[in-house]
Every structure is written in C-alpha cells, then in structure tokens.
Image (cartoon, helix red, strand yellow):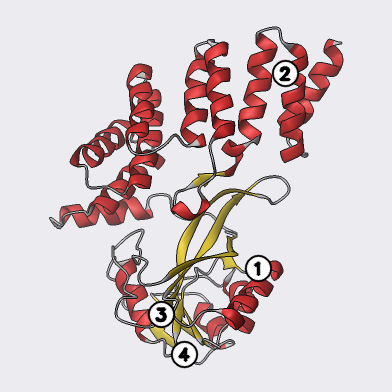
C-alpha cells in the first residue's frame, strides 16, 4: 500500500486548520505543516496533529513555500491541501479505497476540487487538480502565485473530491499585489501567470487593464487551450463591463478556435442575445449548451449550472417572452429537477400558477 505525506503551508488559520487536519489525518501517514508567519494559534493547533511543524520566511512566492513543505515529506507520495479544505466522509472512504488499490506505477493522481456550492451544498464550480504526486524531483511547484505542478508520468483521475470551505473572507487584493510586485521587480510572467494576472485585474474591477492583459495573453498564442477558452469568457465580461458588446461577442466566438464549444461559453452567448431581446437566438444557444459534454478530466474550470440548470432556467424565461408558456413551464421543471431549492425556480412556479 502506498504511503502519503500531507504537506501544507499555512498562515493565521486557527479558525479552520483543525477541521482540515481532522478530516485528513486518518488517510495519510505523515503530516507536514509549514507556517509562513502566523501570529495566532495556528502552530499550536498544528502540533496537536504532528510534530513536523516548520517555519518558512515568506518571500512573496507560494511555489517556493510549497516546495519547502514538499522537501520535508518522507513518504512515497506527496499530497497538498489548503487549511480551508476538508475531505468529506464519502470522499474519505473513496480515498482509503484508492490507497488500498492504487497501481504502484501511478505518478500523479488528479482529484476534483469543489469550491462553490448551491443551496443544497451541491458543487457549482469545480475542476481537477494534481493532488497526489510521487515523491520525486518532478513533484516541483512552479509559479509565485496560482502555483502548479505539471502532472507527470502515469496519470489517473480519481472520483474523489476535496471540498473548499472558506469560513472567512480573504484579502481580495492579495494576489494582485503579489503579481504587481513581480512586475515591479522586472520579472517576466509565464503564460499561465499572465492568465491569472488578468483574472485578478478582472476580480478587482480593473476591466480595461484586464481586457488588455487577456488580449496580450491570447495574442501571444502560448497559453493552454483551457486557459485560452476561459480567457475568452472573462474577456467578454470585461468588454460588457466597458459597454463594448460587439467586442464581447467577438471574444466569445474566438473561444471556438481553441476547441469545441463549452456549455459555459454557450450560456454566455445565450445571455448576449437575451440582453438584446433576441429570444429566438438566445434559445438556440441555450439548447446548444445542453448538448455540450462536460469534460471533467480536462482540467477546465467547470461551472456546473451551465450543464443543465442554467440553460433550462434561461430557456424558460425566453420561451415565456415568446408566448410559448407551456414549453417555458416545462423547462422550469427541468431546472427544478436539478436544483429543487432554487429561489428562481420557485418564483417561476408561482408566476406560471398565477398566469393560468
């Protein structure tokens, strides 16, 4: 059976660290916690679970901190979690099963990362990350921010999810400040870092700068296909925020040059036409979204609602405005099947009830 070192970096995580380590401790053979400058009880809590607690002087580089943590892992595989992650009971059981049956030739295990949820706790935003890696020099983090290990060797995708459950708000400017410090030092961003820098600009409502950064990223042509597609989607949102709808449309259509249409992009196109009261065209894009396969193992960011709930809900509205009430109500029920507690679904039911 493989052995696993859980290697974490933490700072001021007294609120969530015990929850994380309690869920992970039965699954791993070693826990390494590297503190990057806490001034709360984080290290005291970590010592309740492991005697391998280390300090790392923060140098504005998440990758360097994670590599230090990995260097302290002594078991056959290395695993990472953030302090506000948790492994739910059903995933813990699947994890133990994987541990018992893992082919020893496997180098990288990809696991699902669920980071946003609906009213019932069902994931609405997820993607696969490299989670379990053979303890060897190739298990090396790259990037100062939004760091990553390129999956290597024999790779498997495991039906196991890590659940991200943040309890408190993080500083929305933290990552943007780190990127700007890199640029001020004259460092060159990799294509992946360019993509994430543009996203941080967007998150902080610096839409013109974000649009320019996404444009440079796409025009250089060195990005990974999934990042290119997502860049087109967010670039369109920047253009809409700048009241440039035609340029937003061009960005969405550009995504099709990188791969087959994704449901996320089809929903954005549906909304583009919905906002212009072209309901017939909007319906066609939402129908197309329903036909798009969900490529869970592609590594792409998946907006789960775009693969059923949102297209049905939006088609309900469009068809109602076209006077096709029966079809509209049927699509609302399809949306209800996927998200029974949705406030929008309940509102629509009352609307159709009163319309009779």
Residue 280 lies, in percent from the top left, at 57, 12
Residue at x-position 35% and y-position 63%: 148
How many neighbours does mark 4 have within 10 angstroms: few (below 14), some (14-19), or many (20 or more)? some
Q: Closest to the observer: 28 or 94?
A: 94
Please tell me which of labels 1 and 3 falls first in the chain: 1
Secondary structure at badge 1 equals helix
Residue 299 sits in which quadrant?
A: bottom left
Residue 226 versus residue 73 in the image, above or below: above
Query: Is the N terminus in the top left, top right, bottom left or bottom right quadrant?
Result: bottom right
Decide: marks 2, 4 in contact (CB < 8 A)?
no
- Tell me if I can see residue 339 in this picture: no
Q: Where is mark 1, residue-wise?
A: 91
Q: Where is mark 3, residue-wise?
A: 134
Query: Is the C terminus in the top left, top right, bottom left or bottom right quadrant?
Result: top right
Q: Where is mark 4, residue-wise?
A: 52
Q: Given the current orientation, which residue lies at the most extreme left position?
A: 186
* Residue 31 horizontal side relative to residue 202, left or right: right
- Tell me if I can see residue 102 in this picture: yes
Q: Where is mark 2, residue-wise?
A: 328
Residue 306 lies, in percent from the top left, at 57, 36
Decide: marks 4, 1 in contact (CB < 8 A)?
no
How many neighbours does mark 3 have within 10 angstroms: few (below 14), some (14-19), or many (20 or more)? many
Secondary structure at badge 2 equals helix
């Amino acid at each position: 059976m493989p052995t696993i070192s859980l290697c974490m970096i933490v700072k001021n995580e007294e609120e969530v660290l015990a929850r994380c380590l309690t869920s992970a401790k039965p699954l791993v053979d070693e826990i390494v916690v590297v503190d990057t400058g806490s001034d709360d009880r984080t290290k005291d809590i970590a010592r309740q679970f492991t005697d391998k607690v280390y300090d790392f002087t923060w140098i504005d580089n998440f990758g360097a901190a994670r590599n230090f943590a990995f260097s302290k892992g002594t078991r056959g595989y290395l695993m990472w979690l953030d302090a506000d992650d948790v492994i739910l009971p059903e995933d813990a059981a699947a994890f133990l099963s994987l541990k018992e049956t893992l082919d020893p030739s496997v180098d990288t295990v990809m696991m699902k990362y669920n980071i946003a949820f609906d009213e019932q706790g069902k994931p609405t935003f997820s993607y696969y990350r490299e989670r379990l890696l053979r303890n060897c020099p190739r298990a090396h983090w790259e990037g100062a921010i939004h760091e990553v290990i390129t999956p290597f060797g024999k790779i498997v995708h495991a039906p196991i999810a890590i659940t991200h459950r943040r309890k408190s708000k993080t500083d929305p400017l933290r990552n943007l400040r780190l990127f700007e410090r890199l640029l001020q030092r004259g460092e060159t961003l990799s294509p992946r870092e360019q993509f994430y820098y543009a996203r941080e600009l967007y998150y902080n409502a610096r839409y013109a700068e974000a649009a320019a950064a996404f444009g440079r990223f796409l025009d250089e042509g060195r990005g990974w296909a999934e990042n290119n597609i997502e860049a087109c989607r967010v670039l369109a949102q920047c253009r809409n925020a700048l009241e440039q709808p035609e340029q937003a449309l061009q960005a969405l259509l550009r995504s099709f040059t990188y791969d087959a249409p994704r449901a996320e992009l089809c929903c954005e196109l549906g909304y583009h036409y919905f906002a212009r009261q072209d309901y017939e065209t909007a319906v066609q894009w939402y129908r197309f979204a329903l036909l798009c396969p969900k490529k869970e193992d592609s590594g792409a960011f998946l907006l789960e609602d775009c693969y059923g709930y949102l297209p049905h809900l939006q088609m309900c509205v469009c068809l109602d405005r076209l006077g096709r009430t029966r079809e509209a109500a049927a699509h609302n029920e399809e949306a209800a099947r996927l998200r029974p507690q949705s406030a929008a679904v309940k509102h629509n039911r009352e609307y159709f009830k009163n319309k009779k």
